[in-house]
Image (tube, rainbow, N blue to C red):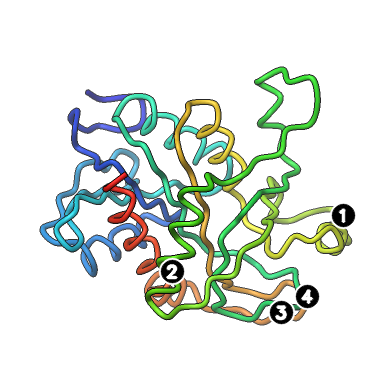
Amino acid sequence: MATAHIAAEKGAFAKTVLMPGDPLRSKFIAETFLENPVLVNNVRGVQGYTGTYKGVPVSVMASGMGIPSIGIYSYELYSFFGVENIIRIGSAGAISDKLQLRDIVAGMSSHTNSNFAAQYNLPGTYAPTADYTLLSTAVESAKDLGLDLKVGPLLSSDTFYDDDEEALHKWAKMGALAVEMESAGLYMNAARLGKRALAMVTISDMPFTGEATTPEERQNTFTQMMEIALETAIRMDKL
């Protein structure tokens, strides 16, 4: 059953989908961690794979960049392919002085400057949040793996190049730990559709100091975050 953006058969995706932004990271995860990965979608080069991890079916598919892009892919996965859980695994810039390069952060909530929530015509300001079961499972998975997973608010921004040079400092004052571009849209889709979502990010750069990892490092070395997400996926399969 193909949709406008996913050409896959019914049942092609597992219950849980890991969702990096970069299609090449999707390919890396499938080839590095999954047993017998099968390419189930490649429309527009947005690679989606399904295989098994420790014997449990798991899928991984790219989201592209930004809330509009992850909004499309997550909506179609949730609505038409029976996906119950989406774990975003991406990169982010640290705006808290408590973070360093390669720290891993789980987004308990997601502040945003996006207008994505306007479609719901809510009588107030919506607060996008992660699913508690996914979040708590990720925290326990990280602990059992001996990895440090920090938890706190993310900033999901529509603007990579922001005309307000003080914008990130303002969000940091309100407790945001890191800035990325997808989590709020994912959280809203999951809430609206009665599904589960979690965003985990690895700190790839420090906007206030200029420190940064290379594109190749972002694609190929954020493996601890991937391991937490995969362990979370197999635990969620039992729920």
**Residue 93, disc:** none
To which residue does mark 3 refer? 210
- Residue 55, given in percent of the width and then of the height, sits at 14, 58
Q: Is residue 3 rendered to the left or right of residue 121? A: left
Tell me the distance, in whole angstroms, between the alpha carbons under discs 1 and 4. 14 Å
Q: How far is mark 1 from mark 3, CA to CA?
A: 18 Å
Q: Earlier in the sequence, mark 4 or mark 2?
A: 4
| Image quarter hosting the C terminus | top left
Residue of label 1:
164
Mark 1 vs 2, N-terminal side? 1
Q: Which residue position holds label 2?
A: 225
Asked if labels 4 and 1 touch by Cβ distance under 8 angstroms, the answer is no
Mark 1 or mark 4: whose residue is earlier in sequence: 1
Helix, strand or loop under label 4: loop
Q: Is residue 34 above or below residue 189?
A: below
**Amino acid type, label 4:** Phe
Closer mark to the observer between disc 3 and disc 2: 2
Q: Are marks 1 and 2 in contact (CB under 8 Å)?
A: no
Q: State the CA–CA distance, disc 1 to disc 2.
A: 31 Å
**124 lies above or below 195:** above
Tags 3 and 4 touching, CB below 8 Å: yes
Callout 4: few (<14), some (14-19), or many (20+) C-alpha neighbours within 10 Å?
Answer: few
Q: CA distance from mark 4 to mark 2?
A: 23 Å
